[in-house]
Image: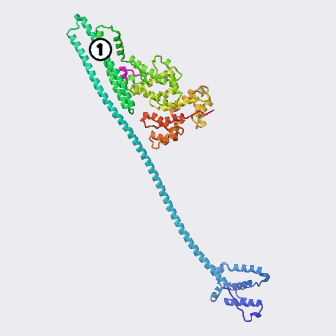
Amino acid sequence: MALVATKSKSSGKRAGTIQYEVLLQEILTKAGCDTSPEAPPEVTRLACHMQLLQELQRAHSFGSLTGVMDAILAEIAKSLYTNEAIADPLAGVHPAARGGAARLPYFAALQRKQQEVAQLEAHARHLQGVIDGRSEADRRALEELQRASERRREMEGTIAKLEYQLAKAEDEAKRAVEEMEFNRSKDQASIQYLEQKLSLTKDALHEATEENKMMKSREEVEMRMREQFAAGAFDSGHGQSRESARLGQGDEAGRLIRQLLVLQNGRIEDFEARMASATSATIPSNDTVGELKRLFAAEMETVHEEIRNLYEHRKVEMASGSIYAEDKGDAEEDAEAEAGCADSAEAPEGGSQPTHTGRLWQAYQIRAGRNELFRSPMAVRNCSDKELRGAISRILEENFLRVCPYITPEVDTFRAFPRTRRPLCSPEELQSMLKNPDDAAREICIPSPDFFFHHLDDRYGCHEVAMLVAHSMLQAVGRLFGVSKKVAMFGKVIGGEVDDALWQYALQCQWLMENHPEAPQWQVNTQSHFEQFWRLLYPQLPSAEISAASKEVCRGQRQNSFSNSTVLEYIIQQLLNKTEPRLRRWIKVLKWKDTLNTNKVHRTDIIAIAPKIFPDMDPKVVDLAFCIAAYRHGGDHMPLESMAYLACHLEATTLEWPPG
């Protein structure tokens, strides 16, 4: 509220100064202040004087002193708002005059400011409460969001676990179906085997009946001879009839021998026909083939034993009558019976016909460890039975030609074995096949260690005999050409310790070494040549490992010399020790892929990952190579280490020398 000065009746007659003096007195009077100059200082009086000064300022009464007076008024106005004045603005004012002083502009403005401050403080407290409430709500929302995130992570983990279990169950179901299909095929093969066995049993019964008739006929002849001897038909008075009886008995034994030989040849042809049907008509079954071989071996042993008995009987009877002269036909029959048909029949396609010597077939039926003669290959050379030793020697000589060009292609095998009658495959044919490693026939037909071992096993019907022949042949290799890492690997392959794919990988390394596109006669005979070949074989190998390999190859050599043979020996030694870089890498990769720790690789898994691990190779080629290599392990799977050997071989077939 502004203070307005009232004019007296004589104000117009007064001067301006007197007018403002009167106005000051009126203001002081209305405020209840002492108007005398000697009054003590107080806030109310000061406020009244300030009111008058402001009136003078608005009336522009200061003239040239307006600027100075404005500064003075501002300073005085600031001094009014001291802490003491704010704490008690009406200090020193008489209680009766406090009401009038409160209406002064200064106090009214102060009250308004205090009210505004109070309102602002209240509003600030309200806003602080709102902020606190929102902070609490945000905190609760954040906690709820964190709990929801945890629940989401738990749900995602549960979903991933269920998906893994579902994939595992699907894989197990798929493998169960494949195993069921495989077992069904085995059952079908077993049924066919039982049917064939029944047919063989019927044939054996018929043959036993015929043999029984033959034995009865022989017994009747012997009985008649005994009756004649008892009746004195062979006394001194009947010398001519006695000699005729002996000759008739010898003719009867010769006739029986000829009948048994005809029966033997017929049974051999029947056995070969049954073997062909068992291996081609259905899925090959080791049990079926083995049973056929065992039955045939037992039958042939019976026939040969009977031939030997008849021959001994004939020889004794003739010796007792001092009959030594025989015609040419009987001499040939005796020689054939004595040898027990030791000479081989005409060899069929793909291999030699096994000899049908009785003692040899008896050896085929004896398992290793049950007979001292066949416990170790070294015993064959010390065998006292010339017939048996000669038969095994012929087997070794004929089958040695199948693998000799692989081990030592520069040696003339015909000179090494001059008594060989007919090779299974000429060295020229083997060399031409060896120079074309990409030929499809190489994977199926060319004699490799694994193929050769199964050839022996299938041909001679006994696993131990196949091992005997294989190890004896290796000893012949060692005697003729010396023992090397290559021969040692060959022995491990045919002994079943490592797979045939490892042998093929070593041959592929040798082929790369000997077939440089720029120089056909290229040799690894210098440090630079070795590093060049090593970088081709292992493109990602560090230089430090290449230097270490170079030093390792030169160890034990004179003047740090290199050659194709020493480098190949070093590669094979690494393969046998499982330290070869490519083999170690593939074993590591396949173990990482084997999440279930089954240590097996199934055909379906290889088909699925073949485009990834062999991007530059047709998946059908990978599938074919897997099926060929996995046949010995069951047909649909192979051990992880065997798959590593096969992967090394397949990867090596894609390596090529860079141009230039």
Looking at this rendering, what residue extends furthest in the left direction? Answer: 231
Would you name the residue on which mark 1 appears?
253
Left or right: where does residue 52 sit relative to residue 271?
right
* x, y percent for residue 194: 32, 32
Placement of the C terminus among the 4 image quadrants: top right
* x, y percent for residue 240: 25, 5
* x, y percent for residue 74: 72, 79
Q: Amino acid at mark 1?
A: Ala
- Which residues, given as a range, are shown in magenta? 353-363
Q: Specify whether residue 308 is in view.
A: no
Asked if the magenta segment contains residue 84, the reply would be no
* x, y percent for residue 616: 54, 38
For mark 1, does the 10 Å Cα neighbourhood hold few (<14), some (14 to 19), or many (20 or more) residues? many
Q: Specify whether residue 64 is in view.
A: yes
SS for tag 1? helix
Classify residue 7 by image quadrant.
bottom right
Left or right: where does residue 539 sit relative to residue 259?
right
Task: Establish if 222 lies above or below 70.
Answer: above
The one nearer the camera, 194 or 379, is: 194
The one nearer the camera, 50 or 348, is: 348
Placement of the N terminus among the 4 image quadrants: bottom right
